[in-house]
Amino acid sequence: MKLVIVESPTKANTIRGFLGKDFVVESSYGHIRDLPKGKLGVDETTLEPQYVIPTKSRKTINNLKKAAAGSDEVILATDEDREGEAIAWHLAQALKLGSGIKTKRIVFHEITRSAIEEAIKKPRTINKDLVDAQQARRVIDRLVGYKLSPFLWKKVRGGLSAGRVQSAALKLIVDREQEIKSFTPQEYWTVKGLFGSAHGQLEAELVGIGHKKLNKFDIASARDAQLLANDIQKSSAQVADISKKEVIKKPLPPFITSTLQQDASRKLGFSAKKTMLLSQRLYEGGFITYMRTDSVHLSRESSLAAKVWLEKDLGSEYGKSAPRAYRSKSKLAQEAHEAIRPTKPDVTPERITAQEDEKKLYGLIWKRFMASQMPDARSELTTVNIKANGARDQYQLRTSSTILKFDGFQRIWPSQSGNSSLPELKKNEPLKVLKTTPEQHFTEAPPRYNEASLIKSLEEFGIGRPSTYAPIISVIQDRGYVAKDQNRRFLPEEIGVVVNQILAQHFPNIVNIDFTAKMEEKFDEVANGFEEWRGVVAEFYGPFLKNLTSKYDEVKKTELIQEKTDVKCEQCGRQMIIKFGRFGKFMACPGYPDCKNTKNLKEPAEKLGLACPKCPDGEIVTRRTKRGRLFYGCNRYPACDYASWKDPRGNKETKS
């Protein structure tokens, strides 16, 4: 009898259906060993982790030990990434495998009969380099969290936490908010002209004056724009030239973890956490390949299967490009061997049996994969240059149109751009100037991060790995460091700004983007066998601990969380100070405990210009709960307790 051990019961059930009576498939129900809760769990001299078996896992371990004892062979079939490799190693340690029991390790990228049978034919041993890379990450993150968090408790307030990766992500959000607040819009103008021809009208934009090409900010005022518009209005115009060229648009590669999370956020409104939960179910149900990956590679078999479906269901012209091959842009891509794709390309979204949200996500994955194997889309771009001879100068205006000639991959994965057309024109054809319009514009501040754009930045900066994006986003929200505005974009809370300032000033490496990315490269070197994991941890921990120890003496709490004010305490006459408490900033008398006078500090709420529906004198304003969720209430609270989650301007419930 052979015992196969996987992480989850769902995965066990799926695999059980593929194997014969000689196999028993059991689940470990996730991690069965971990660092202890409530204490450091790392020997600070040897840096050795002190793993324990949680109480909830002891019954599972006992059952697995009995099953292993009665088996001829134990096959560890956990996921193929570093975390999965670590789980397999922990299982081998906890079950004391190896003493008289033949132990094998198998990996597979999809839970299908053929993949499982092929994996069993090609077993290997546990890759200790991958395990050590995971241990290095786990130990460093535990040391940072359990050593730095108490510093914040003592210097700011209890309940705070700091983490190596979460702090870098928080810095991105705080820096973006500061960039938005300090942004100064710059004015610029454009001029458009509406022209009439023998076969219709066309609109073109001013792109050059004389022999000079116009740059974005060359027309800086309304006066300048109007002078140009007036001169063009009175000019004689004609078609200077017409050019046509073919435009080729290639399909995007199949999904990896980060791009799946981004598109699921943009197109389906799913959080990263929800996307990973749904994709885990689809994977364990055998519908998609492994969902934690940063590789865009596809098996030849999957590409050929896509080609068969495309030619059969859409026509031979749509299967000509398959198989298409893709290469990962990142040199660090290593978490898995394939992109995220359907295990059976001929199983369309309508054919799977799953919950509605699972179907939506599967549909996204299926369409992206199928589109990646389809031909390029081909369009014809026509560009028309117009010459207008005015009294003051000669002007060049330009317009263009695009006509789709062959939709290719856009048959399944439509793009945002559509067809546009121009009237039939000839070179040197005279045009009538019908109207000119100066248009004012202002540069805009960069937008706040949403989940999609934050994940994209995390990936670009090398912060974290595919398995960590969703937890990063969850933890900075759960800690109350960031919230979401009415557009589901991240904004830092007061405490998030304070924590970021402290870390940036006193522990710069913890929030330094480049340093965090270099740590990921170190973990990769451990995984590839080029670095010893304890050396990587020691190299980080020595300087970190030395700096932390000195900061306990150097940094005074009053420097971090107290600000002087010009307000006098009405009870004792002292100059009041602003302090930071559990629920944010407040004003307090420095004479505490002799004088306990305090005042609330409330940021001005946004007025919506709407009367309160509950009282005659109130006005609706935006407010936030202690957890940061946006709601709408009366500005006369507590005299009027009207409150609603729904935006009274559009009657939509907030999603923040």
Image (cartoon, grey):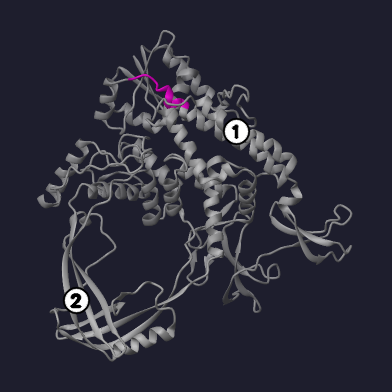
Please report whichever mark, 2 or 1, sits nearer to the chain's N-terminal start: 1
| Callout 2 crowding tier (Cα within 10 Å): few <14, some 14–19, many ≥20 | some
At horizontal 59% and vertical 47% (from top left) the residue drawn is 479
Front position in the image: 361 or 420: 420
Front position in the image: 426 or 364: 426
Say whether residue 553 is left or right of residue 265.
right
Q: Which residue is mark 2?
A: 422
Q: Which residue is mark 1?
A: 143
Q: Work out how far the residue at label 2 is from the one at label 1, CA to CA, in angstroms.
A: 65 Å
Above or below, comparing residue 40 to residue 514 in the picture: above
Q: Amino acid at mark 1?
A: Leu
Say whether residue 460 is left or right of residue 642.
left
| Callout 1 crowding tier (Cα within 10 Å): few <14, some 14–19, many ≥20 | many
Image: magenta residue range: 124-132
Q: Residue 442 appears in which quarter of the rendering?
A: bottom left
Task: Tell me if I can see residue 28 in this picture.
Answer: no
Look at the image and say whether residue 411 sits in the magenta stretch. Answer: no
Task: Tell me if I can see residue 155 in this picture.
Answer: yes
User: Where residue 6 sits: x, y (%)?
Assistant: 40, 27
Q: Amino acid at mark 2?
A: Leu
User: Where residue 424 sits: x, y (%)?
Assistant: 14, 78
At horizontal 13% and vertical 48% (from top left) the residue drawn is 320
SS for callout 1: helix
User: Where residue 219 sits: x, y (%)?
Assistant: 40, 78
